[in-house]
Amino acid sequence: MKAIGMIETRGLTAAIEALDSMAKAANITLVDLKRVGAGLVTVIVEGSVSDVTAAVEVGKEAHIRTGGELVSFNVIARPHTELAKIL
């Protein structure tokens, strides 16, 4: 079963730094990078529960190097199939 992980930052550079670190730390796949507005950017990744959890933990710390702001983060293990429609 796959999991979905999300990290939301204020600033595109911080989001890209987080995604780069996440991809290097675990076997994950980028689902989407959404520009929400007002400088908010959400990175959405998928993979096994353990890989996504590890990637999100690494991504939470990575934004600090750019001076960006971590707004929120979450891991959803075994998301419902209907969730894929909005992603």
Image (cartoon, rainbow, N blue to C red):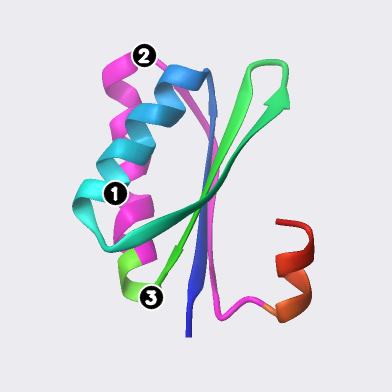
The image quadrant that residue 80 belongs to is bottom right
For disc 3, the marked residue is 48
Residue 69 in the figure: left or right of residue 79: left
Whether residue 86 is situated above or below residue 47 in the rendered picture:
above
Q: Earlier in the sequence, mark 1 or mark 2?
A: 1
Q: Which is more N-terminal, label 1 or label 3?
A: 1
Front residue of 58/1: it is: 1
Secondary element under disc 1, as helix, strand or loop, is helix
Residue sitting nearer the eye, 12 or 8: 12
| Residue 50 percent location from the top left of the image | 32, 73
Pick the quarter of the image with the C terminus: bottom right
Q: Which residues are magenta?
A: 52-79
User: How far is the residue under mark 1 from the one under mark 2?
Assistant: 20 Å
Q: Tell me the mark number nearer the camera, choosing from 2 and 3.
A: 3
How dense is the environment of label 1, judged by Cα within 10 Å: few (below 14), some, or many (20 and up)?
Answer: some
C-alpha separation, residue under disc 3 versus residue under disc 1? 13 Å
Tally the marks: 3
Mark-to-mark CA distance, 2 and 3: 29 Å
Q: Check whether the beta carbons of the residues at disc 3 and disc 1 lie within 8 A of each other.
A: no
At horizontal 29% and vertical 60% (from top left) the residue drawn is: 54
Look at the picture and state if 11 lies above or below 54. above
Tell me the element at label 2: loop
Q: Which residue is mark 2?
A: 67
Q: Is residue 9 above or below residue 4?
A: above
Q: Residues within 10 Å of mark 3 (few under 14, many from 20)?
A: some
Question: Local crowd at mark 2 within 10 Å, few (<14), some, or many (≥20)?
Answer: few
Q: Amino acid at mark 3?
A: Ser
